[in-house]
């Protein structure tokens, strides 16, 4: 045992008792102490050090401390360390810490031992920061010291200090190149605790591991890949691993299956439409280069196709060396890929993206794809010029007159156990109730080709021959019109071209045939020669048949011709037709051909979605322009309606006030006369002390009668006439608003604006005027009982002189003159105030009632104004967004095209088949 080891384990004392094993160490050391003390220059430090160790092991820590405090030779630093250990054991942690910290030595072992003791002490005292600091320092200064890194790792893990744990693992892996530390790092990665570290942090360690053991390198990279996948640093990781792999000497023969799988999954996730091309352009070329360099046997063709398709759409982005290698590999390597499944996955991705971006349901193309993957059924597209007898042939095969007139839609007739008729448009799928609905669809002309009708019912001929007929509208018109029908060629396996025997294979039919060959050069075309029964005799019919077949074979040497007539026996014709179909119905390579057609529909779908984007932009521009125009017109209508309301209100209020003023004038003219006529009631023998009271009462009575019997009926009649006039004004306003609403609804294309005024206002006026004019009760007006000087003197004289007979003549004359000449203006004012008081609130409410009358139309117009503003704002924002970020729409479709070309490289082109464009 070495000296340092003895000092660490406190077994230095054993040096003194080797030959005295049977004697207690205390006794041996005591005797040695006495012996040494006898010398002239004794060195007792060594023995005291050994004695301290024995006392320590026997837990006599105080004695041990006493011994170690008296060491003055080279063992003094170890003695201080042991002293601190004894205080530690006594629980005097602060003292122990002070002593540990005071030890100064160049001995790395002693320094490390002291550091480990301090580390334990700090943990016990809860001083975790100090413990962390001391263990990190120890790792740096003496990482090879036994158990130091293991102690540190355990500490980090117990306290979930993953950053330092990861740092330790990475540094030790690089320093020691020990696979155990790489395994530990992989464990941390799989725990998910490394995500916060930059991907470049691990690069150096990965390079070292690659040179040590490639399998572990692959699995550590895989773990890191998985950990970064859903993090913000994912693209940083991809760039880092790209750079790292490019600088490694990768060999495809080493079977990098895990990394190859990661490249495949990542590549497809990158190009599925979630990311802009700008973000991918700098990343993908190196990514594909690495994939091709390490692709395992299952992914060589796929990675080669990925390189070639990306380079096609982004020329010169991948090095020519890699492109050449990819071309060589894809031509020589076979793949067992499930082509149909991969193709349908691509199609579904496009459909999901289109739906998520409000590009419609695309039901027609979905239905067409469903037909293409029905490999048990051959699809015959039946076409021909209008009037060629196509519908008659279809009815004969189906055994029923399903079409009594030329069809205007595309119809697929299929055998099925259940009867069902379904109409498929891009927007929806509808079930038709029966033949009536079906016939209605057949007869329509407008937008007929925007839908497909699927007609399913049990049919022995279709079932036995495993075919379905796609019946199309008769061809006529120009090249573009025919294209709308012939675009369904790509869902068909064979074309049956119907010819009229009376004028077979005309120039127009040859033009149609050329168009078919242009659109679908690989499709087989055979011919049905109809109306054979209209030929004058059998010999002539045979001649026409042979000449027609010869002309056809000049253009299409492999085309067959079948003669058909509605007058022939149907059973025999069906047998002949069956033989005719079986003579050319070849299901060989149907899956490959259907796959090519499926890719065609994917390509056209991508193109149509791109066109839809343009259409959407144009629609938004048009919508903004239209809404701006509508906003201007609606604002004009609002202002016009407000002006109308003001004008009508003025007119109606003014007319009411004219009536009121007329009544007021009548009262002002009639009442004074009526009061003055009351002078006739004054007699010479009247009681002049009370005459004023009698006159006042009579005057009120006469006014009451006048107002109730004369004025009120006239006022009522005037108000009724006024309400009738108002009704006419209201009706004129409503007519004006009806015209306005019709004009706007014509522009909207729907009954959106119903500008109905509130005629209940008239009912309210009628009710109010009836109530207010039904009866009037005048409260007594003080006409002759006021305290005016003249009245006061007259009444005083009446009381004073009324009893004196000779004065009565004088009073009679005075009273009579007074009544006839009095100014009754104040009384008249009081009477009018009473009379019109119930009508004051009515008059004040007229303007409010007019507002209520026009409230509905004004509210609706204002709402339409807001709708127009909102439409402008919303569509302008969408338009701005589309123009600001055109890649938001364009890039996903471009990436779908990359995937499509990649698939074509792997399938159609790889099998020598022609790609359909």
Image (tube, grey):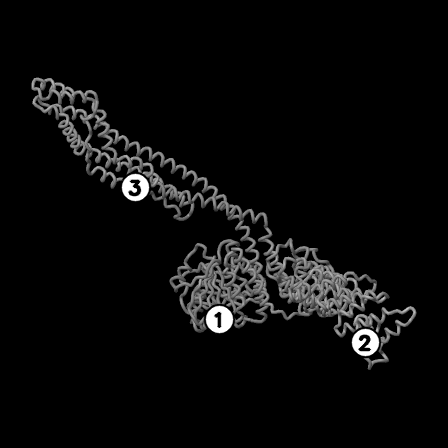
Q: How many marks?
A: 3
Q: Residue at x 81, y 69 (%)?
A: 67
Foreground mark, 2 or 1, reads: 2
Classify mark 1: residues with Cα within 10 Å, few (<14), some (14-19) or many (20+).
some
Location of mark 2 (residue)? 26
Give SS at disc 1: helix
Q: Position of residue 619 (x, y in %)?
A: 51, 48
Real-space Cα separation, disc 2 to disc 1, in angstroms: 121 Å
Q: Earlier in the sequence, mark 2 or mark 1?
A: 2
Q: Position of residue 147 (x, y in %)?
A: 75, 69
Quarter holding residue 213: bottom right
Q: Position of residue 860 (x, y in %)?
A: 39, 44
Q: In which quadrant of the rendered image does the C terminus lie?
A: bottom right
Q: Earlier in the sequence, mark 1 or mark 3?
A: 1
Location of mark 3 (residue)? 761
Real-space Cα separation, disc 2 to disc 3, in angstroms: 124 Å
Location of mark 1 (residue)? 577
Q: Is residue 680 visible?
A: no
Classify mark 3: residues with Cα within 10 Å, few (<14), some (14-19) or many (20+).
some
Q: Residue at x 7, y 23 (%)?
A: 685
On screen, 470 above or below 814? Answer: below
């Amino acid at each position: 045992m070495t000296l340092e080891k003895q000092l660490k384990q406190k077994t230095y004392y054993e040096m003194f008792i080797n030959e005295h094993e049977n004697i207690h160490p205390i006794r041996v050391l005591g005797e040695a102490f006495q012996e040494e003390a006898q010398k002239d220059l004794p060195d007792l430090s060594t023995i005291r050090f050994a004695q301290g160790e024995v006392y320590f092991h026997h837990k006599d820590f105080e004695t041990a401390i006493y011994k170690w405090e008296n060491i003055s030779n080279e063992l003094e630093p170890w003695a201080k360390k042991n002293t601190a250990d004894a205080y530690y054991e006594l629980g005097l942690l602060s003292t122990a810490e002070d002593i540990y910290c005071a030890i100064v030595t160049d001995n790395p072992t002693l320094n490390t031992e002291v550091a480990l003791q301090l580390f334990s002490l700090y943990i016990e005292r809860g001083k975790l920061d100090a413990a962390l600091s001391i263990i990190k320092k120890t790792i740096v200064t003496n990482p090879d010291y036994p158990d130091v890194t293991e102690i540190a790792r355990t500490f980090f893990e117990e306290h979930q200090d993953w950053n330092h744990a990861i740092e330790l693992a990475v540094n030790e892996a690089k320093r020691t190149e020990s696979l155990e530390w790489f395994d530990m790092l992989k464990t941390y990665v799989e725990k998910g605790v490394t995500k916060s570290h930059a991907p470049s942090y691990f690069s150096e360690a990965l390079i070292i591991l690659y040179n040590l053991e490639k399998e572990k390198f692959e699995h550590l990279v895989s773990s890191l890949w998985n950990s970064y996948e859903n993090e913000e640093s994912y693209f940083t990781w991809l760039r880092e691993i790209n750079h790292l792999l490019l600088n490694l000497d990768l060999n495809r023969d080493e079977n990098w299956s895990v990394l190859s799988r990661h490249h495949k999954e990542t590549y497809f996730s990158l190009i599925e439409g979630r990311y802009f091309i700008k973000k991918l352009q700098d990343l993908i070329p190196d990514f594909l280069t690495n994939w091709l360099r390490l692709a395992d046997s299952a992914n060589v063709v796929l990675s080669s196709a990925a390189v070639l398709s990306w380079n096609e759409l982004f020329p010169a982005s991948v090095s020519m060396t890699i492109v050449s290698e990819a071309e060589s590999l894809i031509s020589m390597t076979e793949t067992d890929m499930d082509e149909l499944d991969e193709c349908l996955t691509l199609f579904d991705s496009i459909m999901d993206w289109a739906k998520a971006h409000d590009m419609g349901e695309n039901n027609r193309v979905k239905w067409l794809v469903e037909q293409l993957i029905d490999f048990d059924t051959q699809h015959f597209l039946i076409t021909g010029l209008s009037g060629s007898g196509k519908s008659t042939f279809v009815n004969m095969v189906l055994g029923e007159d399903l079409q009594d007139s030329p069809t205007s839609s595309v119809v697929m007739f299929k055998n099925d156990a259940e009867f069902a008729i379904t109409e498929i448009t891009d927007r929806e799928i509808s079930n038709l109730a029966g033949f009536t609905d079906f016939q209605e669809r057949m007869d329509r002309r407008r937008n007929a080709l925007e839908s497909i009708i699927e007609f399913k019912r049990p049919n022995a001929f279709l079932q036995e021959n495993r075919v379905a007929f796609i019946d199309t509208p008769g061809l006529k018109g120009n090249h573009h019109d025919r294209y709308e029908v012939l675009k369904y060629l790509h869902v068909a396996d064979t074309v049956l071209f119907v010819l009229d025997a009376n004028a077979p294979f005309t120039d127009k039919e040859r033009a149609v045939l050329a168009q078919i060959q242009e659109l679908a050069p690989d499709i087989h075309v055979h011919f049905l020669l109809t109306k054979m029964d209209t030929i004058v005799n059998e010999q002539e019919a045979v001649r026409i048949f042979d000449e027609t077949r010869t002309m056809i074979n000049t253009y299409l040497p492999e085309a067959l011709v079948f003669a058909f007539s509605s007058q022939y026996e149907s059973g025999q014709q069906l047998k002949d037709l069956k033989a005719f179909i079986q003579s050319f119905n070849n299901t060989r390579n149907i899956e490959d051909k259907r796959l090519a057609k499926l890719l065609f529909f994917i390509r056209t779908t991508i193109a149509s979605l791109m066109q839809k984007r343009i259409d959407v932009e144009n629609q938004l521009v048009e919508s903004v322009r239209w809404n701006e125009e509508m906003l201007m017109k609606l604002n004009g209508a609002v202002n016009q309606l407000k002006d109308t309301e003001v004008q009508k209100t003025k007119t109606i209020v003014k007319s009411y006030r004219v009536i009121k003023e007329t009544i007021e004038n009548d009262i002002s003219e009639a009442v004074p006369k009526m009061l003055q006529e009351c002078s006739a009631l004054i007699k010479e023998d009247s009681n002049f002390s009370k005459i004023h009271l009698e006159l006042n009462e009579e005057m009120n009575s006469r006014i009451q009668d006048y107002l109730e019997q004369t004025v009120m009926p006239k006022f009522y009649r005037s108000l009724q006439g006024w309400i009738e006039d108002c009704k006419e004004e209201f009706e004129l306003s409503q007519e004006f608003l009806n015209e306005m609403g019709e004009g706007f609804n014509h522009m909207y294309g729907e009954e959106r604006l119903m500008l109905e005024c509130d005629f209940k206002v008239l009912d309210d006026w009628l009710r109010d005027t009836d109530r207010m004019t039904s009866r009037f009760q005048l409260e007594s007006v003080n006409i002759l009982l006021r305290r005016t000087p003249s009245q006061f003197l007259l009444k005083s004289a009446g009381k004073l002189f009324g009893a004196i007979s000779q004065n009565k003549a004088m009073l009679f004359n005075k009273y009579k003159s007074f009544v006839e000449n009095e100014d009754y203006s104040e009384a008249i004012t009081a009477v009018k105030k009473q009379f019109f008081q119930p009508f004051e609130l009515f008059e004040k409410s007229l303007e409010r009632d007019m507002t209520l009358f026009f409230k509905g139309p004004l509210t609706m117009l204002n709402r339409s104004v807001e709708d127009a503003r909102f439409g402008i704002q919303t569509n302008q924002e969408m338009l701005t967004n589309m123009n600001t970020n055109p890649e938001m729409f364009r890039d996903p479709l471009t990436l779908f095209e990359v995937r499509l070309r990649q698939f074509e490289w792997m399938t159609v082109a790889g099998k020598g088949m022609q790609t359909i464009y």
